[in-house]
Image: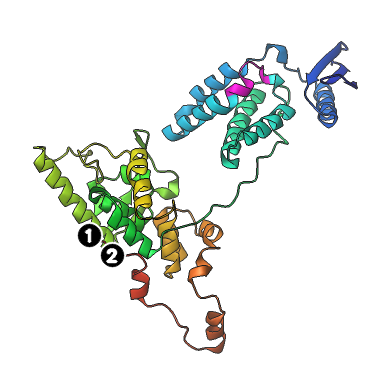
Amino acid sequence: MAVKRTKSGYQLWWYDAEGKFRKRTIKGIARDEAVRMERELLATRDRGERQPDERHAPLFAPFATQWIEESRAGWKASTVAQYQQVLKSQLLPAFRDLRLGAITESRMRQLLTQLQDQGLSARRINLALLVLKMILRTAVRRRFVREDPTEHVRGLREPKTEVDPLDPDMVTAFLAAGPPWWRPYFTVAFWTGARPNELAALKWGDVDNARGILRIRAGRYRGHEGPPKTASSVRDIDLLPAVVDALKAQKAQQAAERLKRGRGAPERGQDYVFTGPEGGLLNVNALRDRSWYPTLTKAGLSRTRHTFASNALAAGEAPSWVAAMLGHASPEMLFSVYARYIPNRTRRDGSALMHRMEGTEPVTKSATEAAAVLPKYSR
């Protein structure tokens, strides 16, 4: 066995299990990668395994397209759309006409660098890498490729999520500046932390006033309705007073609009809580572009997120309750995401520990203060 340097990479020379001389040239790799491949070839030969002939491996484009088609039965519609977009925008331009065996570790690293130079976020680049790894590992299992080139390729470090929520006064300003039709929607969003796609799929049958809960059982993405994001996202959300008032206002304005247009009550299963002013399905992207961003601008506010969780935690609500409202499996993520923001709004002088150690009563926020962290809904 030998490893020879070439102008564009390295060449491997070896004798197979039948004693036949073999030669393989691999472009775009470093010496340590060539040596690793040499050792794997020898180990495979000694085990008596037949090596795949990578000269006859499928091209990347048809194989990747077929992989998505074969796998999509187990994915949500949003996942299928996301992977198809990654394939179209990031992977096919780089590997379309290459055979699977020609996609080396070095080529993968070059792709990461190219995508970073194009200004893509670390999160988007890592998603592209994830899809590429799944495709190539499938090729390895089907013996189109000798070894897994993805083994030592790691994703980029993603920056921590920046939390810049609206405080109670900002929420009041936003609701006052926003379109009256969407005021109930944004109130429910601020007071529950429900995701936009979950509110888009919410039906009046999911509102249980007797038990004081909203049942989150579905979400809608690009017109397709299905289960929520994760198993823990299937949950019941407490109906706080502001949410109850907002839902009453929403039901009243929907009824008035139907009466004005001569429409009857919607059929069972189509009685969505949040609809467009003319009765159509809620389009989350259009709402974001036509109402959310313009209202932030009108109210003199910056683009923001995480308002419910930050305000609830700042009011002293239990992290376990906040996590349950958001549909998180545990409160762990709350501490990592909101750790920098929460101390700015809460006592951090050691007095709680002092009161505990000295056996005195700690000074805590009243229930009224905690309940007032967001402004009450007003029509």
Provide residue 163's location: percent of width, then percent of height.
Answer: 50, 56
Q: Residue at point 27% right, 37% down?
A: 281
| Amino acid on which disc 1 is placed | Asp
Is residue 122 rendered to the left or right of residue 238? right
In the rendered image, residue 48, in percent from the top left (x then y), is placed at 80, 20
The three-letter amino acid code for the residue at tag 2 is Lys
Is 179 situated above or below 2?
A: below
The residue beneath circle 2 is: 376
Q: Secondary structure at mark 1?
A: helix
Question: Foreground: 331 or 316?
Answer: 316
Tally the numbered discs.
2
- Left or right of residue 357, residue 107 in this image: right
In the image, is residue 47 part of the stretch drawn in magenta? no
Q: Is residue 314 left or right of residue 256?
A: right
User: Residue tagged by mark 1?
Assistant: 245
Q: CA distance from mark 2 to mark 1?
A: 9 Å
- Residue 270 picture location, percent across and down: 22, 38
Whether the residues at callouts 2 and 1 have beta carbons within 8 Å, the answer is yes
State which tag comes first along the sequence, 2 or 1. 1
Magenta stretch: includes residue 97: yes
Crowd rating for badge 2 (residues with CA inside 10 Å; few <14, some 14–19, many 20+):
some
**In front: mark 2 or mark 1?**
2
Which secondary structure lies at badge 2? loop
Position above or below: 192 against 13: below
Q: Which residues are magenta?
A: 92-100
Image location of residue 141, percent across then percent down: 65, 25
